[in-house]
Image (cartoon, rainbow, N blue to C red):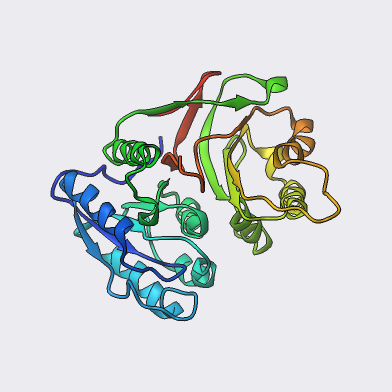
């Protein structure tokens, strides 16, 4: 059984940092702080949060410093990404030299934060693929996101009903959930840092990509041997996809099925995970169960 960080308790301290794009204090951030306070958690801003270096949230050294600071601060029990964007992969080699396993805590984020999730996964430390502070709002759907996240952080069982499943291979599955943003997984595979184990359940989602590039990434992961190893595929939102004047001719779902159907693995589409207003938290590096209707994590 995978050991996990301690679930959060009232009076715990949690950190907010931005390892990718620069962060600006705004209404969403205030709502995030209010939400955490209502759970009894104290939000601590990382030393360089708010710094700006062109698109990035400070220099590489500053952003790495904040991650190391949060990791080595024993009072901090969870670390939240303020936002995504681009930049975390610039820190990859340095992050791999940190020992996340000796000081386990929950790291929460998605999108570009998949880089951090991957480092944690390779060290055997579970993490949470979930909303970032930029997503906090009074929208009822996003309020549901925060309810799911607080349940996950408190160790409560979370489940949701699958909206659409590849009916040709519909069957229950279970396994360790891994993955995150498709573009980042593609980059990590090119860097030789993506490790998928036999029987894993892979989660993918993406935003703002051309359909031909979705195909390129899916083909590359297949060549890398990913789909021949996994026991199931969970596909979150594939948002704001683009096409060329000469159409590619396939939807993201069709691109995925065309490649993975040879492995006859169950595929859940439209999982409530990713860049849409609905973005439920899930635990990466820990077991998940699908009973044919509901996806669940104990």
The C terminus: image quadrant: top left
Residue 92 vs residue 154: left or right?
right
Judging depth in this view, the residue of 207 and 8 nearest the camera is 207
- Image x and y of residue 233, in percent: 62, 35
Identify the residue at horizontal 61%, vertical 26% (top origin).
164
Q: Relative to 264, does residue 194 appear above or below in the rendering?
A: below
Quadrant of the rendered image containing residue 97? bottom left
The N terminus: image quadrant: top left
Q: Relative to 34, does residue 51 appear above or below in the rendering?
A: below
Identify the residue at horizontal 47%, vertical 58% (top origin).
113
Identify the residue at horizontal 36%, vertical 42% (top origin).
139
Judging depth in this view, the residue of 237 and 87 nearest the camera is 237
Q: Relative to 148, does residue 5 appear above or below in the rendering?
A: below
- Image x and y of residue 107, in percent: 37, 53
Identify the residue at horizontal 29%, vertical 64% (top origin).
70
Q: Relative to 134, does residue 98 appear above or below in the rendering?
A: below
Judging depth in this view, the residue of 70 and 108 nearest the camera is 108
Q: Is residue 77 visible?
A: no
- Image x and y of residue 240, in percent: 62, 50
Q: In the displayed image of the protein, which residue is found farthest to the left?
A: 11
Residue 172 vs residue 101: left or right?
right
Quadrant of the rendered image containing residue 23? bottom left
Judging depth in this view, the residue of 66 and 271 nearest the camera is 271
Quadrant of the rendered image containing residue 146? top left
Q: In the displayed image of the protein, which residue is found farthest to the right?
A: 246
- Image x and y of residue 185, in percent: 61, 54
Residue 191 vs residue 13: left or right?
right
- The tally of labels here is 0
């Amino acid at each position: 059984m995978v050991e996990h960080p301690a679930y959060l308790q009232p009076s715990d301290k949690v950190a907010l940092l931005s390892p990718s794009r620069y962060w600006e204090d705004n209404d969403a951030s205030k709502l995030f702080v209010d939400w955490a306070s209502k759970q009894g958690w104290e939000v601590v801003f990382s030393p360089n949060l708010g710094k700006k270096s062109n698109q990035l949230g400070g220099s590489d050294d500053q952003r790495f410093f904040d991650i190391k600071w949060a990791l080595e601060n024993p009072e901090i029990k969870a670390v939240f990404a303020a936002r995504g964007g681009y930049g975390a992969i610039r820190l990859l080699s340095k992050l791999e030299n940190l020992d996340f396993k000796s000081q386990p805590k929950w790291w929460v984020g998605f999108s570009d934060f998949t880089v951090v999730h991957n480092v944690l996964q390779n060290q055997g430390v579970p993490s949470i693929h979930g909303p970032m502070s930029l997503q906090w709002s009074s929208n009822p759907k996003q309020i549901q996101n925060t309810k799911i996240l607080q349940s996950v952080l408190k160790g409560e069982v979370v489940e949701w009903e699958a909206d659409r499943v590849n009916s040709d291979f519909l069957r229950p599955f279970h396994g360790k959930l891994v993955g995150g943003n498709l573009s980042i997984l593609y980059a990590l595979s090119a860097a030789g840092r993506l490790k998928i184990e036999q029987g894993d359940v892979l989660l993918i989602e993406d935003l703002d990509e051309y359909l031909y590039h979705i195909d390129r990434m899916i083909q590359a992961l297949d060549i890398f041997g990913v789909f021949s190893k996994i026991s199931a595929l969970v596909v979150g939102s594939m948002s704001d996809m683009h096409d060329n004047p000469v159409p590619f001719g396939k939807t993201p779902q069709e691109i995925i099925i065309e490649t993975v159907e040879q492995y006859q693995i169950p595929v859940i589409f439209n999982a409530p995970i990713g860049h849409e207003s609905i973005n439920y938290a899930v635990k990466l590096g820990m077991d998940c169960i699908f009973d044919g209707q509901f996806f669940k994590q104990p």
